[in-house]
Image: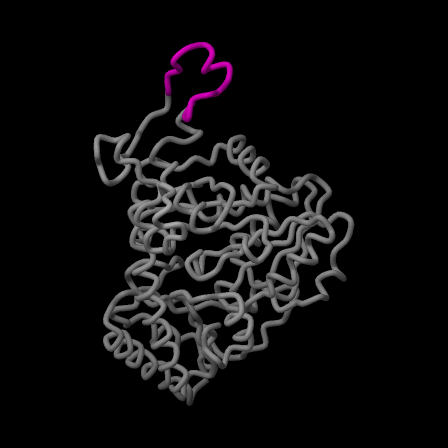
Amino acid sequence: MKKTTILPNPSMNTRLSHTGRRPDEQHGLVNTPVTRGSTILFKNLKSLDNHSQTFSYGRMGNPSTRTVEEIVTELENAHGTVLTPSGLSAISTAILSCIKSGDEILISDSAYEPTRKLCDGLLTKFGVVTKYYDPRIGTEIEEIINEKTSVIFLESPGSLTFELQDLPLITKIAKKHNITTIVDNSWATPLYYRPLDLGADIVIHAGTKMFVGHSDVMSGTISTNEKLWESVKKAHYLTGVCASPDDAFLIARGLRTLAIRMETHQKNALELASWLEKQDIVEKVLHPALPSHPDHTIFRRDFSGSGSLFSIILKPAPREAIAALVDDLELFGMGYSWGGYESLVLPAKPENIRTATVWKEKGNLLRIHVGLEGIADLKADLMAGLNRYSQFLEIK
């Protein structure tokens, strides 16, 4: 946003409303219009030779993408941000910017499954070794670092099992060994968690989720400190992971209302999570903002708020019980994503992907994204599903 002396430290809501807007440059229009185009003409040979124009080619950005990048840079207190066409492309581009053949990277065992598939699949072809670590690791992480370790990837909380990581501790150790730290911050958003301020080098978002907020656009962002900016910007340019200007317009639109949406998502999720803790059929609720969560102390220290997503562990029952619960839900859809206005559930099996730790819970895990519906309606829908599930407990 335009810097002023009247508002030396504007609130997040004000920044979301004003950052990236240039009405004087766009005929007074409040929103940055969609700018479609591939070819951009240079004024003269000097501007071509010196790359002195703000924009030079469609793949390298335009006013639409610049708006989103400026908003996220402001929110994350970053040196710069690049926009990508998906959350996974943000993850892959960020990692590729920091590694070379022969390197090793350390990844939390609770990380997003596509992140694991990227590292265990594609990166192995280039001689990069991935090691997974306990997401609740402390100073012991130094014991698995060696001279080949170039990146530590954190996801806090993990998007299925919701362990928090001690980011200040891990980044301090990483800096000691000149290792880059990358943090997936999709859950809390920069409104409630600022990884760069806690020592991280790079922060990524699946903008598809909370930034967009309407389940209609794929997007990702990579924000960095000054040290990593040039390498990330170069990787973004060389891999060609550019975002559509039409998508950028919708991402910017979503970001303008992020604060009020997050406030409602947080309120609804906490109320639903607290209610579920009281249900006999629910063995555990995995939500870092609840006092019952093992990492609640870290949450209170590092986070200023919480997201829409959490998981529950149900009493053990056969697969048919899960089907009975989810198949007839009326308000909760079943899908892989989250962050939109509509509530979602997703049955998951963490035990199938863990390699550094053992998932010891015997009950069924159900991940819940709490949307913007009436909370009483959501409780009624889930209660009906839990009752259907409970009918199978006697025959498990």
Instruction: Decide: is 356 above or below 254.
Output: below
Q: Is residue 84 left or right of residue 102?
A: left
Q: x and y percent of residue 273 in the render? A: 39, 77
Instruction: Decide: is 50 above or below 154.
Output: above
Q: x and y percent of residue 310 in the render? A: 43, 70
Residue drawn at x 37%, y 56% is: 11
Q: Is residue 47 magenta?
A: yes
Residue drawn at x 37%, y 24% is: 38
In magenta, the rendered stretch is 40-56
Q: Is residue 251 left or right of residue 147?
A: left
- Tell me where residue 69 sits by quadrant: top left
Q: Is residue 54 magenta?
A: yes
Residue drawn at x 37%, y 74% is: 270
Q: Main secondary structure of the magenta part?
A: loop
Residue lying furthest left in this view? 28
Residue drawn at x 45%, y 66% is: 304
- Tell me where residue 168 sits by quadrant: bottom right
Taking depth in this image into account, of 205 and 392 the one nearest to the observer is 205
Quadrant where the N terminus is found in the figure: top left
User: How was the colour assigned to the protein in this rendering?
Assistant: one colour
Taking depth in this image into account, of 242 and 301 the one nearest to the observer is 301
Q: x and y percent of residue 16 in the render? A: 34, 50
